[in-house]
Image: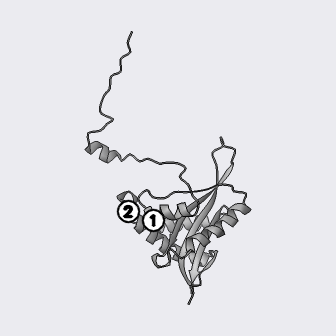
Amino acid sequence: MAIRIEIRDATAKDLSEVADLWEMLARHHENLSPHFSLAWDGKRKWSKYLKKKFSEISTKLIVAEENGKLVGFMLCMLSPNAPVYKERKIGIVSDVYVLEERRMKGVGREMLNFAVKWFRKNRVRTVQLFVAHDNMAARAVWHQLGFEPFMIYKRLDLDRLEEKASPLRKRTIIRRKK
């Protein structure tokens, strides 16, 4: 029997279930790196954030549903680009999660197709997203879906910097020849 998954706009009734899926996404990231450790009330805060964003016209929340149960979600937004660029508005794919047992079945692709229609309707020409460096499976999926590397973000953990012989502490004296 073929799996029947419906991709649709989320409703207010879906927000609690989306928050549960988001928590799974957050736990997945915590397992990738301690840098993703959640605050004790992280889910509550994200749920409040989601409720606020959900009411904005610049946000699209897409869900994948199978037999009355959500198996995935994608949170998308319209964002002004930096005013120095020709492209005035960009699309952002903020958060995405698909239940593990439904991965590799085209759910993410179908949610992205749904999102692309919305982005095009809103005259967006470029869509960006962030992927955790150590999330190799997600990096591969996004590459397969056509996303290319664009920016590299670096992180400096100041607590760890203190523990090591810091390269910032080494002094280099540069003298100019006369």
The image shows residue 129, relative to residue 65, as above or below, that is above
Query: Which residue reaches farthest top?
Result: 178
The residue that disc 2 covers is: 32
The three-letter amino acid code for the residue at tag 1 is Ala
Mark closer to the observer (1, 2): 1
Neighbourhood count class around disc 1 (C-alpha, 10 Å): few under 14, some 14–19, many 20 upward = few
- Asked if disc 1 and disc 2 are in contact, CB closer than 8 Å, the reply is no
The residue that disc 1 covers is: 137
Q: Is residue 157 left or right of residue 90?
A: left
- List x then y, in percent, for residue 16: 53, 76
- List x then y, in percent, for residue 63: 59, 74
- The answer to which image quadrant residue 178 occupies is top left
- The answer to which image quadrant residue 129 occupies is bottom right
- List x then y, in percent, for residue 105: 54, 76
Residue 28 in sight here: yes
Mark 1 vs mark 2, CA separation in Å: 12 Å
* Residue ID at (30%, 47%): 160
Can you say which quadrant of the picture contains the N terminus? bottom right
Nearer-N-terminus badge (1/2): 2
Colouring chosen for the image of the structure: one colour
For the image, the number of numbered tags is 2
Q: Nearer the viewer, residue 15 or 175?
A: 175
Q: Which mark is residue 25?
A: none
- List x then y, in percent, for residue 46: 50, 65
